[in-house]
Amino acid sequence: MNSIGEECTELKKKYDDCFNSWFSDKFLKGDHDDSMCAGIFKIYQECVKTAMKQQNIDFKEIDKDILGTENECKAPPGDSS
């Protein structure tokens, strides 16, 4: 799957590869130190934030807790579907 921003897709692939390696080679063997991929994750995260800003996606909308609230079954503002 591609990233939200086309310019971030290669970073996403690198992070996914790192995460999958960490998960199978370390986490499943009891090593829960997740710092192995922290550097690439930070770079990828910044790229995604920039892409979101370019697409006018509000960070507050992403962090909202919806499940289990009265807003769970409501369409977001501006959504006429």
Image: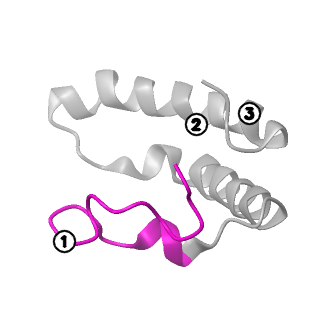
Residue identified by numbered label 3:
9
Disc 1 residue type? Thr
Q: Which numbered disc flags the more N-terminal residue, 3 or 2?
A: 3
Q: Residue at x 38, y 73 (%)?
A: 64
SS label for mark 3: helix
Q: Nearer the viewer, residue 51 or 30?
A: 51
Gap in angstroms between the C-alphas marked 3 and 2:
10 Å
Hey, what amino acid is under mark 2?
Tyr
Seen at 56% across and 56% down, the residue is 80
Work out which residue is located at the far front of the displayed protein and give it: 80
Residue marked by disc 1: 69
The reply, left or right, for residue 61 in relation to residue 5 is left
SS for callout 1: loop
Q: Nearer the viewer, residue 74 or 13?
A: 74
Q: Is residue 61 above or below residue 67?
A: below
Instruction: Residue at 42% x, 60% y: name it.
Output: 75
Position of residue 24 measured from the top left corner of the image (x, y, whole percent): 31, 21
Distance from the alpha carbon under mark 1 to that under mark 3: 33 Å
The reply to whether callout 1 and callout 3 are in contact (CB within 8 Å) is no
Magenta span covers which residues?
Answer: 60-81
Residue beneath disc 2: 15
* Image quarter of residue 47: bottom right
Upstream in the sequence, badge 1 or badge 3?
3
Circle number at residue 34: none
On the image, the x and y values in percent for residue 2 come to 67, 29
Residue 44 is situated, as x and y percent measured from the top left of the image, at: 67, 50
Q: Nearer the viewer, residue 29 or 72?
A: 72
